[in-house]
Amino acid sequence: MNNGGYFCFRGNAYHIDQTVLEFLDHVDKPDVRIYLERREDIEIEGRLTQVKHYNQKFYPSKIAKAIKSLYQNYDPNKDSKVCLLCYFPNKIPGIKRYSIEELTVKFKLDESDEEKLKSFSKVFYIEFAEGINEAEKTIMEKVKKVFFCSDDYVFTVIAIINMFLVECIIKHPPGQEEQRFVMVKDILNKLKYTPRGQADTYIEHYYLTGEYPSKEEFAELPSEAQRYITERIGVSISQKENLTQEEEEEIQRNARERFVNKDRRLSVLLGILYLLFPVKEADINLLKKIAKYLSIKEVQLKEMLNNLRDENFITLEEGVYTTNDLDKSKKALRDFLIEENTNIISDLLKFFN
């Protein structure tokens, strides 16, 4: 009986499992892109990775083809790490590196480009990993830890992540490899219903409005999510009741600065919001619309803000913009939005007039 289909399916499942683990390791970096099946199986933050799940004992000849593929696709200008992540039943998990001589003798790498070979030898390594069963156990443990999920919701969260990743691959046929990527924040948006997602919503609301979740809302969250909110904001709900206004403003400012450092999109958003109007007076739903719009116009918006700063209309301190000429700054943003012809311009303009 030919079991090739079984091993092929198992290999694809292992590839997805390893991608899920990459996502779980980067949940605090929302702007990171994960490329799938572009040049190799996974590309993330300058690391080029091929994933293999073998059912035979390890021999160097088994991985020669995979290493040749990685070497062929390696770009010294893009890749700071190159990894063959593989499972063999007779190999203990760990890292293995090879010298130039070993790469050319054992794996027959092309020696014609000496500079590329030398560079490749410095960044290439093999990670002997756990098998598929152990990987899936690790995923379950990490999902519980990252999203504060009970056992009942773990499989649902994993299924949503899996579907998102698989869809990314299958909806882009050959010729559309550059579009085969997901952003960490896009997957997180699909998981807003989890305790982690609810906690992030409360935190974002706090940064925009200064309003802490109510005692009732806070009490409904699992203890891990409560600790997460307290750590991110910098004060617990019980401590908050005893703070002076000055102490509370200082905590909010410090928390906002930490948040700005973690999310470039919100750095721009918060800067422009504080530039234009007191956030407490703004409608929270409209702010979310602004956030969504500005996130896709980040480069143009930053250029406009830099021009204002060059003209001494605004200053930038610790990630927050302040204005020296509010009227001119408002006009510059209004002109920018009109030029972009956004469909929320009518809503936005009521704040700028």
Image (cartoon, helix red, strand yellow):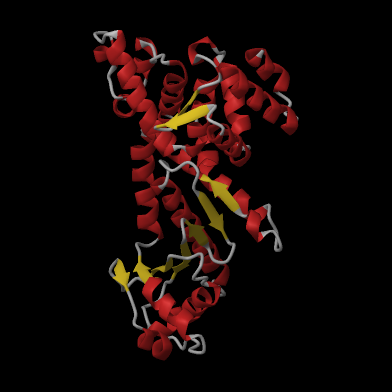
In this picture, residue 58 sits left or right of residue 349: left
Tell me what residue is drawn at x 52 percent, y 50 percent. 33
Tell me what residue is drawn at x 48 percent, y 38 percent. 264
Horizontal and vertical percent position of residue 303: 59, 39
Q: Is residue 26 above or below residue 51?
A: above
Asked which quadrant contains residue 277, the reply is: top right
Tell me what residue is drawn at x 67 percent, y 24 percent. 334
Horizontal and vertical percent position of residue 242: 24, 8
Residue farthest front in this picture = 311
Residue nearest the viewer, comparing 4 with 100: 100
Q: Is residue 8 visible?
A: yes
The C terminus sits in image quarter = top right
Q: Is residue 242 above or below residue 129?
A: above
Tell me what residue is drawn at x 38 percent, y 15 percent. 212
In this picture, residue 345 sits left or right of residue 276: right
Horizontal and vertical percent position of residue 350: 67, 13
Count of numbered labels shown in the rendering: 0
Q: In this view, does 83 lie above or below 342?
A: below
Asked which quadrant contains residue 153, the reply is: top left
Q: Can residue 190 be seen in this view?
A: no
The N terminus sits in image quarter = bottom right
Residue nearest the viewer, comparing 99 with 21: 99
Q: In this view, does 309 lie above or below 85?
A: above
Residue nearest the viewer, comparing 296 with 328: 328
Horizontal and vertical percent position of residue 124: 40, 72
